Amino acid sequence: MEPRILIVDDEEKIRTILYHFLSDEGFKVKSVSSGIKAINTVDSFHPDIVLMDQNMPGMNGIEAMELILSKDPSSVVIIITAHGAISFAVKAIKRGAYDYIEKPFDNDKLLLLLYRAIDHKSLISKMSELKQKLDDKYSFGNIISQSDEMGRVLEQVKKICETDATVLIQGETGVGKELITQAIHYNSHRKEKPLIAVNCGAIPIHLLENEFFGHDKGAFTDAKESYIGKFEQANGGTLFLDEIGELPIEAQVKLLRVLEDRTIYRVGGKKAIPISVRIISATNKNLAEKVQNDSFRLDLLYRLNIFTITIPPLRERTEDIPLLVDHFIRKHNSKLKLNIKSISKIAMELLMQYPWPGNIRDLENAIQSAMILAHDGIITEETLPMRVCGYPEVEEKFKFGKDGLDEKVKLINSRVEKEIIINALNKCEFNRTNTANMLKISRKTLFNKMKEYEIIAQ
């Protein structure tokens, strides 16, 4: 589409010259003689750029610009100033103008400024679209559920969004603790600021302080540059402490001090840095038991569980399974370029009966696997993971067709291997290092197997 330029100038000669020049350059142009007419024209013409003269009778350029911006904050206004009126131009920019150009202006300079302004307008539009997509992605409507249990959780989440209270989210692995965290952050007043996630169980103990608080240049031998820690990265926003129950006791002391003082010190630094972060923690452990075992500080627990949200496991809200299955089919049809249309009644009954130790993440992996194996666009019991079907006899589950013995054994072996890997991942809460150790394989081999079997790691 042609960029649209609105010229606002009380001098007819200037309007005529600009109109013909910009029309010849490929712009769609409209011109008016006053600020009042400009305000009335904006609604119908929808200009990309408003080229506004500063001195006009009745209403000057800044006054007209402010009224236009009050109606549409995304408007881009360039002020035309008299030669030497720099102070007026600076005032205009402070009050919302994109830029200014002095009379008499050079045509090439004007074109360059217009194209820059159009690029700026396009960038603002794209950022607005991305922000809207982000808001849509983390809206409450994207939390798939119809159960009373999750309904109560969502009511809690909606209430806590309106506050800055510290939140502790409890629930088994795979129930969606991170999704709830995202919903809280992106529906709060902090949504324009960062959401920074830290896996407390994945950081080596000797790096924890550095990861949390950062370091100053020269703090230690290899500290050639300063490093901004997670607390500073999240300043103004939300810090998500995942697997908080895995945080070593010595690191808990430092975290407690930050929660009390709301200031941090970088490693090697002497300057206190004030921080404003909302803390959301998540755990699949019983922190009260860890307190009894002297592996978690009671005073830290008091600080973290000001407001507690407990997400029920999938086996306690089986009425959500059909909705989730439908969601995952639509999601992975797009990702995998498949056309799965439905799931058989028997297959759905099996999904409803299975206890899902890995919860929603486990269900998603199962659906994705079944979709890849499905025929004629239908997920059936034959395509479901064997653990879901209760490991029936091989000859009942895999009837011989065109495949011979070798092909059939290879198929069974691959599916059993995938099941073993998924079970191990669930037991190790998807920690790849611990899973690889449990399976007695290298981390690289585990990664390759997960990639081969398209196992989702979250």
Image (cartoon, grey):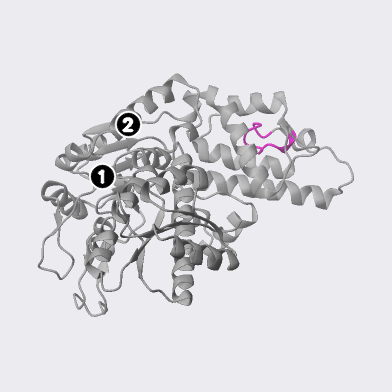
* Amino acid of disc 1: Ile
> Which residue is more in the foreground, 447 or 404?
447
Q: Position of residue 115 (x, y in %)?
A: 49, 67
Secondary structure of residue under mark 1? strand
Tally the numbered discs: 2
Task: Give residue 279's mark.
Answer: 1
* Residue occupying image coordinates x 15% and y 71%: 268
Work out whether residue 450 or residue 92 is closer to the camera in this orientation and state it.
92
Q: Where is residue 228 in the image (x, y as percent from the top left)?
A: 26, 65
Residue 309 numbered tag: 2
Q: In the image, what residue occupies the spot 59% across and 43% down?
A: 365
- Left or right, 116 with respect to 210, comes to right
Q: How crowded is mark 2: few (under 14 residues within 10 Å), some or many (20 or more)?
A: many
Between discs 2 and 1, the one toward the N terminus: 1
The kind of secondary structure the magenta stretch mainly shows is loop
Above or below, 15 relative to 327? below
Q: What stretch is highlighted in magenta?
A: 382-391
